[in-house]
Image (spheres, rainbow, N blue to C red):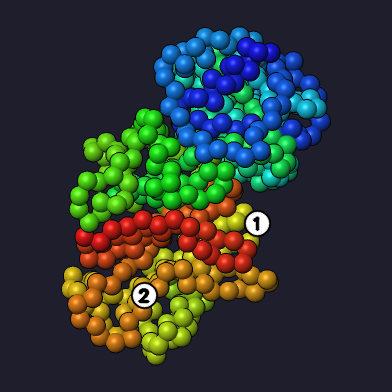
């Protein structure tokens, strides 16, 4: 037991890894012979700010070397047709929160496990294998939602499970390998120590801030916790996963107008325009938006009414995007509308004409009524000289703190200036939680 607890402690220290232990309220199921149960441990009543620490190579080698592997059935046999096997049910005994499943897979083989959990429980899933060749995916069986895809190269996942359902874990490897899958699900309401999860506007390299135990933290607050080495950042363009890239510890520019903003250094040989980068143990692109036609009458009318209320008597409505998406994961869709008419900006001039505007508006249901909420708004009711209007656009819709809700990332661009703000949508309102920017 001491050796196994030591093994789990080592995993806690691995690079950009989460230190979560999750759930004990899993529903009763048939026992699994290959699972090794570990007694629950009690998290401190007041968690300290835990960095996503970077482990050394000797810790990783010692972790892998300490594993004892037991063969488990796979879904394919080399040289034969693929045969789908029934998923293996993971059993948690009373008072136990962690199960370790050991196995070996041949190239191209996979194996599936099922874990039952209730909505609101936190889970930590980690896989360890020689040379890191094994990976896993996580999908909800009832909602069909992918919470981690195989393309996500992180070998761990952390998050709050949003539905009471079975969760399918599929382990796969492209090379023959032993593996150890560690699944931990904490009881509802457990006080779990989590790491700091940084968020970066990769276009500028500015550290937006991050989250810890689901709470938003400013960039200068989390900067000291990120000084222990490089981290593997997940890259998202809009709501699309674009791969991963190592980013160094954040630093402060020594001079210039942006000297007070921490920046994360990334390799200079790639184009990161429009990219949001984050270290996360969960799938940030939980749900994908659906685009609507820009001439849809109801949305044109919505923007027209807003601009009239702002003093533009006869607005020229120019929608630039209309996206429908379920931000809160409650089965009710919201609609994000962007629209802009900036004649001076279009001509490259520092002016604004009467009737110019830029707006990002959210339509959502509040207390049973459809409500229009301007998130970002700039309106000019008369001609203005020597002004640099800001054009607002939706940069991304991602789960940035692991709570299952999607945040809205808004980009504002002006002459020699750019700003990025993260907005959190709740049942009743929308509020800004993180922001970074600089005007040269």
SS for callout 2: strand
Which label belongs to residue 126? none
Identify the image quadrant of the C terminus: bottom left
The span from disc 2 to disc 1 (Cα, nearest Å) is 31 Å
Residue 208's x, y, as percent? 39, 50
Q: Do we see residue 112 in this rendering?
A: yes
Front-lying residue, 271 or 321: 271
The residue singled out by tag 1 in the image is: 330
- The number of discs equals 2
**Does 91 appear above or below 219?**
above
Considering only vertical position in the picture, is 110 above or below 149?
above
Whether 363 is drawn above or below 194: the answer is below
Percent across and percent down for residue 255 are: 20, 49
Hey, which quadrant is residue 187 in on the image?
A: top right
Direction bottom: furthest residue = 313
Q: Position of residue 196 (x, y in %)?
A: 49, 39
Q: Which mark is residue 378?
A: 2
Task: Give the residue displayed 74% in from the left and 32% down from the top.
Answer: 24
> In the rendered view, does 119 fall on the left or right side of 437?
right
Q: Residue at x 44, y 74 (%)?
A: 295
76 vs 241: above or below: above
Work out whether residue 386 or residue 227 is closer to the camera in this orientation and state it: 227
Answer with left or right where residue 346 lies relative to residue 302: left
Does residue 138 appear in the picture of this structure? Answer: no
Q: Who's the residue at 40% across and 48% down the image?
A: 219
């Amino acid at each position: 037991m001491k050796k196994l607890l030591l093994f789990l402690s080592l995993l806690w220290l691995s690079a950009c890894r989460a230190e979560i232990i999750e759930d004990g309220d899993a529903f009763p199921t048939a026992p699994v012979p290959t699972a090794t149960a570990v007694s629950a441990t009690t998290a401190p009543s007041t968690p300290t700010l835990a960095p996503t620490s970077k482990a050394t190579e000797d810790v990783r080698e010692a972790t892998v070397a300490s594993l004892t592997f037991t063969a488990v059935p796979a879904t394919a046999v080399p040289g034969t047709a693929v045969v789908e096997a029934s998923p293996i049910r993971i059993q948690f005994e009373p008072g136990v929160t962690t199960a370790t499943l050991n196995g070996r897979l041949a190239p191209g083989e996979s194996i599936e496990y099922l874990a039952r959990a209730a909505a609101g429980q936190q889970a930590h899933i980690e896989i360890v294998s020689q040379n890191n060749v094994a990976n896993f995916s996580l999908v909800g069986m009832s909602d069909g939602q992918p919470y981690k895809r195989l393309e996500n190269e992180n070998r761990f996942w952390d998050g709050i499970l949003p539905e009471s359902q079975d969760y399918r874990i599929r382990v796969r490897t492209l090379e023959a390998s032993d593996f150890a899958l560690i699944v931990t699900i904490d009881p509802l309401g457990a006080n779990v120590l989590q790491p700091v999860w940084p968020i970066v506007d990769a276009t500028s390299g500015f550290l937006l801030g991050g989250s810890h135990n689901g709470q938003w933290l400013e960039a200068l607050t989390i900067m000291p916790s990120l000084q222990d080495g490089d981290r593997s950042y997940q890259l998202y363009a809009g709501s699309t996963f674009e791969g991963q890239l190592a980013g160094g510890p954040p630093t402060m520019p020594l001079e210039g107008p942006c000297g007070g903003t921490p920046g994360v250094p990334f390799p200079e040989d790639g184009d990161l325009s429009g990219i949001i980068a984050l270290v996360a143990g969960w799938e940030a692109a939980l749900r994908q938006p659906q685009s609507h036609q820009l001439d849809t009458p109801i949305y044109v009318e919505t923007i027209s009414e807003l601009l009239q209320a702002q003093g533009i008597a006869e607005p020229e409505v120019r929608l630039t995007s209309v996206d429908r998406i379920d931000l809160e994961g409650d089965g009710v869709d919201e609609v994000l509308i962007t629209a802009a008419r900036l004649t001076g900006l279009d001509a490259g001039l520092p002016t604004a004409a009467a009737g110019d505007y830029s707006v990002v508006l959210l339509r959502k249901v509040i207390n049973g009524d459809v409500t229009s909420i301007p998130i970002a708004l700039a309106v000019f009711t008369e001609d203005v000289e020597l002004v640099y209007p800001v054009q607002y656009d939706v940069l991304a819709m991602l789960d940035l703190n692991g709570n299952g809700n999607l945040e809205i990332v808004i980009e504002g661009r002006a002459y020699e200036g750019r700003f990025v703000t993260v907005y959190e949508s709740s049942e009743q309102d929308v509020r800004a939680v993180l922001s970074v920017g600089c005007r040269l």
